[in-house]
Amino acid sequence: MNKSILIKISVILGVIIAIILASVGCSMIKADPDEAMISNKDDVYATFGDYRVTRGELFDMMMRVDGLDYLLTYVDKLILAENISNVTPSDIENEKTILIYGTLNEGEIALLQSNEENHQVLLTTFENNVKAVGYDPDDPAELTLYLELLAAQRAKARAHVIAAGAESDFFIDNDELEKFYDDNYRNDACALVIEFDSATESKLIFNDLDLVQSFNGGIGEYFNTTVPIEDVASDGFSLTNTIQLSNEQVFTKLVELYNVQNPNNTLPADIDSEDYCNDYADLATYNFTEMTTGVFEGSTIDTFAKYLFDTIDLTNTDTDAKYYSQSPREFGDSFVFVYKVSQEPVEPFGNMTGDEKTELKAALTDSIMDTDLIGYVMEEVREDANFSVVDPFVGIKYQFQSGIEQDLSGDLSIVAKLGDVEITADQLYTYMEERVGAFFAIEIAKEKLAVYGEYYNLYYGSSHDYLSNKADLMKTHRADLSTMKSTFSKNGYSQYGYTTTLLDWNEFLFVLFGVKSDMEALEKQFVLPSLTIDLIQPTINIPDAMEFMQELYDNYFNLYATSITIFLDQDLNFEADEIADVIADMDAIELAEYSALRAHLEDEIRAKLEDDMDFEAIVDEYNDTPIIDTDSVWHDYKVFGFKLKVEDLMSSKDVPLTYTNTQNTALYDQSLVDALFRLYTSYNTDENKELDSMLDTQIISEHDRYRILEVTKGNSFEKPTAVFDSSSTTTVYSEGIDNENPIPTVAQIEIYFKINFAQAKNETPLEKLPSSVSNAITNLYSGIYDLYFQPSGFSIVAIDTMLAGNLTFTENNTLQQAQVELLRDILISTTFPDDYVYTTK
């Protein structure tokens, strides 16, 4: 499948906008073509304070931002009416699942659900997204209305790809089909798998049985009784002292090895490979689909599956072919020998019937069906239905996105055509306004508050003719825009797909920024961002953050941490087993034995630590000790199956663990977070504060492992404090700096505001903070402060201003008011922490 289209705008927007605005000659601008506009465009849609929003302004805003998306949704509902009528409740549930989890794979979903807090975030995000566009997620009828088009698009795309002929960009040819078949279909394999904790352990046990790894491309048996096998150099084995074992003999020896490594679950010593596969099917049988479904490509289990099923090739009939590992293969924390007994080959692709190939094509299609593919198919479906956009701006955006030439002729009332059906501005306005009118009214309010407010006059004067405004800041904006225009005219953005052969300057502005002229570009991309901090900062109610800062202070820690991790992997999937699953089937005696062994293992580890062994040395000793060493202190634990490894617990490279970065993530159990805080508190005592590192005296129990922690001081180990006494220094700081408490005061934060404000305006701050106080505010408050300046933060300010200004909608006022208040709640809940109480200043 090779669909040739221009670069998708969704892929490059984030990168190109940042680059263009950082790099900020002219091309000729065409005469304005006819743009579709609604009737009664000057009628008032909503009022608040001294401002009003007209229907025309609302339509323009909706079209600039989301007009194309809503137009395509409107058209797709017409094209797919029959598909929509065939959507089932199961289809709706599938779409809901995909929107929540991003997959239908049960294993991946279970993983996402395993962390209760993260799972709740996914559910809440879905519900908020549904509410934000005017649907009720708790109403089955509303939810169906929201999801049925997605289900219909998926069904249409699936059928379209499956049925695509050779002339189509979506045609799946035999080569692609065969590759998919070869990559994904395997019959079950029967294999004997032996696991070791290290290559050294495997070598010692092989030595004990007089077996030689990697001998002449296979495994040999050493027979010289004069020189012990451990004294023979690796290149000292030859046919004069070693027998080359046949495949059958190797299987027998590996059974012996298996029994050594698994003393509690042995096989009959004389069992042959056929009886092993038949009598021990639960142990011997490996299923490729089960092993590779719901796992990441390149993961340990995925790599092991491909080694077992593909690398060990039973179809190789050479006389010297070997169907087993000649040396230990490393997978994750384990070293593994595999003897592959059997694997029935799948039916050759060339022997498949037409019906079987159709089923295979459906499976391939399902495996690649994602949002992008559905989007590409729908572009072709619309083209086949004679859909074309008449509106020049929305049309050029779709033309650029799809690579399909559009009408673009322009019309005063018609936005697009679907065959003989005309889609008018009035129809599209009604369709959009019903769901998102209130939301875009807020966006218009943001612009009006900025452009017609006091701060605009402060920086730009009274003129709103941005092309001739004499203010220095506006001159800077025009220079930046001119630089951008010059770069575009010289095809400076061609690497992102924006060239003068595809777009003129105004079209470029609309495709990238949703603006139609230099005037609009100056306002939306330069003036509005420059005024944001002025509009938001005065609304911040600092006392709202006091409880939040107190929580951060009370729970503060900043540590690097390493652990000796104790775990089990009884099912050999190269992941730690859930402790609850391990003990679920144990009786009282078995549970007591397990608990006692785990406790004694901890004692042995601590005894080694007291002997000045470090974590790495202890784990290496444990893993290298063969299970046959009955005199070793590790013997009983290895027999039971306990595994050890060292884990570095930094949140990312060189980033210490903190209260903030360990919250609401599946990476860190709450038990670990609690332990880190406990250790940080202990580290700060007089007894411990001079230590280079500190060892935890307790063991941490997580859902799938136990940890013994060692911590060192992080790069911001000292607990921040805003305590300051200006009388203790001769340096003159801003008035209001004194504070007897570690939590920053309102006065201190207001000084911080003024400094930040000046720096944002490229001005020299007049205020001055002690570095210790500034550090405390950065650590305890800036996380909240920065959230106010997200786009959603400005939207909240706009809503509060609208509500305070007696917001009134001309139609459906009660319903629309409720939607605005709902949007405010959603914006606050998605912008700020769950327990943060946002109030209006």
Image (tube, rainbow, N blue to C red):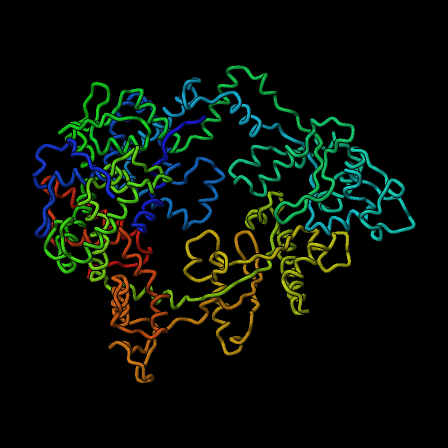
- In the picture, residue 347 is in which quadrant? top right
Specify the quadrant that holds the C terminus: bottom left
- Could you tell me which residue is drawn at 21 percent across and 26 percent down? 416
Specify the quadrant that holds the N terminus: top left
Figure check: 731 above or below 780: below
- In the picture, residue 53 is in which quadrant? top left
**Whole-percent x, y for residue 207 in the image:** 80, 48
Figure check: 801 above or below 129: below
Q: Nearer the viewer, residue 84 or 722?
A: 722
Taking the view exactly as shown, the residue that stands out farthest to the front is: 25
Question: How many numbered circles are shown?
Answer: 0
**Whole-percent x, y for residue 63 in the image:** 21, 37
Q: Is residue 471 left or right of residue 249?
A: left
Q: Nearer the viewer, residue 568 or 73?
A: 73
Q: Is residue 431 left or right of residue 100?
A: left
**Whole-percent x, y for residue 414 in the image:** 16, 27
Figure check: 767 above or below 216: below
**Whole-percent x, y for residue 700 in the image:** 54, 60
Figure check: 335 above or below 421: below
- Could you tell me which residue is drawn at 46 percent across and 57 percent down? 670
Residue 506 seen in this snapshot: yes
